[in-house]
Amino acid sequence: MALGSRTLLLPLLLFCCVRGTASKETCDAPLVSQLPQSAFRSSSQLSNSHGPGFAKLNRRDGAGGWSPLEFNKYQWLEIDLRERTEITAIATQGRYGSSDWVARYLLMFSDTGHNWKQYRQEDSIGVLSGNTNADSVVLFKLHQPVFARFLRILPMSWNPKGRVGLRLEAYGCLYKSDVLSFDGRSSLLYRPNPNLSRAGEDVLHLKFKTLENSGALIHMEGDHGLSLSVELFKGKMLFHVRRGKRTSSEFSASVSLGSLLDDQHWHLVAVEHIGQNINLTVDKSTQQIQVPSHLRLSDIKEINVGGVSGLFKKNFHGCLENVIHNDVNIITLTKENRQVSITGNLTFVCMEPADVPVTFASAESFLQIPLAEHRDGLSVSLQFRTWNKAGLLLTFDLQQQAGSVWLFLSESKARLQIHKSGRILVDIAAGSGLNDGQWHSVAVNARRGRLSVQVDKEDRSTAQASPSFPVVPDDHLYFGGCPDKDNTASHGCRNPFNVFQGCMRHISIDNSEVDLVMVQQTSLGNFSDLQMDVCGITDRCSSSYCEHGGRCTQSWATFHCNCSHTGYTGATCHTSIYDQSCEAYKHKGNTSGYYYIDIDGSGPLVPHRVYCNMTEKTWMVIQHNNTELTKLKASLGINQHLAYFNYSANAEQLQAIITQSEHCEQELSYHCKKSRLLNTPVGAPFTWWVGGSGEVHTYWGGATPGSQQCRCGLQENCIHPEHFCNCDADHKDWANDSGLLSHKDHLPVRVIAIGDVNRPGSEAAYQVGPLQCYGDTNFWNAAYFSKETSYLHFPTFHGELSADISFLFKTSGSAGVFLENLGIKDFIRIELNSPFEVVFSYDVGNGPAEVRVVSPTPLNDDRWHKVRAERNVKEASLHMDQLPAVSIKAPPDGHVRLQLNSQLFVGGTASRQKGFLGCIRSLQLNGKTLDLEERAKITPGVRPGCPGHCSSYGTLCQNHGRCAERYNGFSCDCGLSAYIGAFCQKEVSAFFRPDTSITYTFREPFELSKNSSAHVSSIHSDLTLRDENITLSFRTTQAPALLLYISSYYREYLAILLNRNGQLDIKYKLQSAKDAEVFKSSSRNLANGQLHRVSLRRASETLHVQVDHHDSVDFNVTSDTEFNAIKSLVIGKVQEFGELDPEIARLNSLGFTGCMSVVQFNSIAPLKAALLYPGSSPVIVSGPLEESNCGMSLATNPYASETTHSLTGVIAVVIFVILSALAVIGRFIYRRKGTFGTQEPKESKPEESPEFPFNSDPNYVLSESQKEHFI
């Protein structure tokens, strides 16, 4: 089943259902001017000459128009058009020769003169604009025509220096229709004439009105067993399409449309079946169901109207109008008793009950009803509907000041409490879920010491209490609220609960219904801020403002979208929480891993998971269900093997990824043994594959499209030159044809058909790799605006209900307009208002509004800045870089549609003023990227592309990596870093065994005999250092151990080692005539199998040593400040035993067992050179050296949903543990002694040490005169 949403009705349905049986083409005749005075009514009149009958357009009779006696919003003018009429326009005028006119008004309509309905624009705007003087005529054309007999005008504002004055005219035409009334037990069966059926098409439409919230309208049966039911359920219209029985149907689909359809007003229903699509419509909303090709709803054999016995729980109770099936009026046939069978009583007049609802819309709303004297109890009942969970329904004081009774909604339940002096004497509750917008009844009875509350006339929803005092009301009842005691002389109250916002009807006191018409006429009781004779509830969720599957909940005044588990956020779930590509994730500093991407941002495509391989090129990898090598053997009776590939992204997502990418590829491999592939050169191919568009292809990986060749055929190096594929040689030995498919229009591979596997001895294997793409063309799409008068223009932006605009900019200018799109009155604009402020301004008909974000730092710093603006029906927001977002709420019940009609201007305005100078990049509107570069190529003053990305993204290059500019983006040059990877963030690590050695030679040795007159220092003067900067990471359980050794031609050296206690020692010998100096950084045991990082920095005589994230420790080097004639750097075992200090030689004999990582000496990375560039670097590697990920830190990535771990790393860790244990055994076997001088760190502080595995005294520290023994 496929569902799609549409908001416009088909023109055919509109014409049939709106015009009824009217024959004229136009519908704009005057309707009021010929009516008698008796057709006019009003709430009041100033005098007889100001009566409603004088309110005809351009007439000067009487006082020249209608004027009411009172000045309030409860005044109205009513017109009886005598019969049901189609109204298309309203014209208003002030009272002749006066200062009286109506500036704003409400338009109401009704079929009965009761139960009025308000006309609304855009389903939200109810107030219409009137006049600004007494003589001009203001014509308002209704966006959708109204069908009614009665019209009412309610003035909302008028000339403040005059009073209400009104003349009017309505335009339209007579509306003739056929009506059928059902009583809830009746129905009819219609059997269409098969000779009049349409080929492949079936259309049914009707109108209905009802006060019942449930009942079956239509059930259609087709010849092919497909049925469609249209059923009203809890005020919504349900459409069910199925094949077979309800319990075990072959095909089933359901759609729910509309809401609050039990309001006793006419609603349109249409069913249109064309081909495989069934379009279902209720009023302005349409959804589509796609049925399987072998099922059709055409050739209808019967249509049940009003219900089917045994199929539905409840028949329809209400009126139907113009039930038309394929241009046949079923009601007309019913009148003529042709082709129909009738069950029960049907009438051809719509009999409507005269319900009078009342709307409580504000905090000041209440209804006061007086009570008769001499009572001994109370019985009150009413019906209500609301969206709010809480609100006061009824309150009254008890006689003799016995307390106050409060009936209210709390957590969607009806709750009754009796309060007295701050105490709650009675507290009972009944019902649940009463805020669902449906009509519910509640009854309160107090008689003979018993008190009860019953909801919806159900015994299970009844609560009772037995108070010890009589529950007898005083003289008034208050419904929905009550006047404040502070503002009322008497009969006031202080409401401790929320006000009620909703509708009430059928208010009864002691089984006598309150006449609300008398209340409206002020003949009974009192009220405040009520809408009489109308239920103003609206379903704010029915418009589907919540996007991307967001769940809508609502109250009386607003709605809320719950975006949980949708992948989207915002007031209407419009904004994706995921980036649109791996490229975007990379430029936030993320590394390789699995990520969710939303390829079209706020568009209809849902997020999906891909693998992002963050190398120099950012690869997006989309897996499918079979990437492994799959073997096939000969099978008798099977001529062809078909393999289908299902990807982790759907077809629309894959197409969007491929289109957006610079390059895509997919590996295709075929291994064969006596199994031909393409049967080249002239035979029909045995094997073929199907691409993303569904086309069959007969070329193989590595070859060009349409060539029917393999890669070896293109390169002319196949096993047999006469064939274009290795496998086509049909050898008994294994061969293969492999290569990459890279023609984007043909990707991805959907199906492979392999044919030559049915001969004896035939064997084959195939493998289809994942789809891999790199290069986000949208992310880097940019334009440079060099002139203030230049701009780019694009088609009109259509973002009526939801509009999001995002882009990056960089500039050195102080102000400029980024983009602008205008309408007749509406507009949208984003601009740099000052070096510190970005402004998003717009108007959707409610007046101009602005959202401003102020930056604490200048935005004209020629660095990239991200802007994202969004406007929806609830709010407008502006995001700027990482600054807090700023938003403003939309006005309640205001205009919601953004209506634009001009071109979209980018980088400037239509007036060529306030143009933007600088770069704009990755401009997206509602998830669609505008091609700035393509438009810039043909626009003067604008250049495609924009260089200079390192100023913004250079900080992503870590660990001494250098940012290198590229046309589309940048790359990190890791040549001077000990790290590798996209951001020079990936550790280069290796596992060392005892005999592993890496020697980096700084200068080839010279024989002094060749130049005996030259001093050695003159030969090596360029390698004399006054400072060193060394970093390394290691992981070991070996102590003692030599980590790093640097030697010179003068027998000077630097050694970094762990002593027998696992503590870090730095040993410097900068004068051959003096003893070496030893610097101890701390007493912590670093030979604990954990990863540690050491940083050493010497500047002349000052030495700084830092271990891990602890504070740096400073030392003074006293022997010398120059490290002369540097010869070599050794990691692991030093091979030159003859030149070593005896103590270093003893350590060196042990070698090093463990992990070394990211070793850096000044600008040299010896470990990286040995592992990655051994042939081009001055390094010598001795013994086994294994690259490993043992030096990886376990930093978490907040964006990645999963990280990858290589099997090699796991094996390396296992080997590391085993060899470390062997090294510990070797340590205890080795027992040699040695002495050297030591220095303590300056201002060193004692510190808690971890448990040392080898030293019995963890606090043991050598003094300067002590000797250290390696045991």
Image (cartoon, helix red, strand yellow):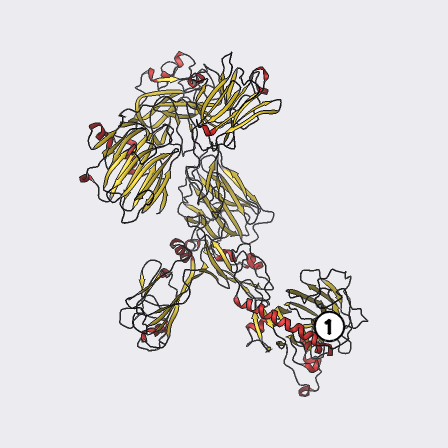
Quadrant of residue 328 within the rendered picture? top left
Q: At numbered mark 1, what does the secondary structure look like: helix, strand or loop?
A: strand
Q: How many marks?
A: 1
Q: Position of residue 1262 (x, y in %)?
A: 78, 69
Q: Residue at x 39, y 12 (%)?
A: 49
Going by the numbered disc 1, the residue's amino acid type is Tyr
Front-most of residues 618 and 501:
501
Instruction: Decide if residue 877 is in sight here.
Output: yes
Mark 1 Cα within 10 Å, few/some/many (few <14, many 20+)? many
Q: Is 991 a magenta residue?
A: no
Judge from the rendering whether residue 711 lies leftward or rightward of residue 1167; answer left or right: left
Q: 1092 or 857: which is nearer to us?
A: 1092
Residue 929 lies, in percent from the top left, at: 43, 51
Q: Quadrant of the C terminus?
A: bottom right
Magenta stretch: dominant secondary structure: loop
Rendered residue at 26%/40% (across/down):
221
Q: Is residue 385 visible?
A: no
Image coordinates for residue 777, horizontal then vertical, percent: 44, 57
Q: Is residue 333 above or below residue 1020?
A: above
**Which of these two is toward me, 915 or 408?**
408
Report the residue that reaches farthest toward the bottom.
1009
Between 624 and 1006, the one nearer to me in the picture: 624
Question: Compared to 186, does 844 lie above or below?
Answer: below
Taking 1160 as reference, is 801 left or right? left
Is 1046 situated left or right of 1173 in this image?
Answer: right
Q: Mark 1 = which residue?
A: 1068
| Image quadrant in which you'd find residue 822 | top left
Residue at left 29%, top 66%? 638
Residue lying at the far right of the rendered structure: 1265
Query: Where is residue 98 shown, x and y percent of the image?
Result: 43, 18
Q: Which residues are magenta?
A: 1246-1256
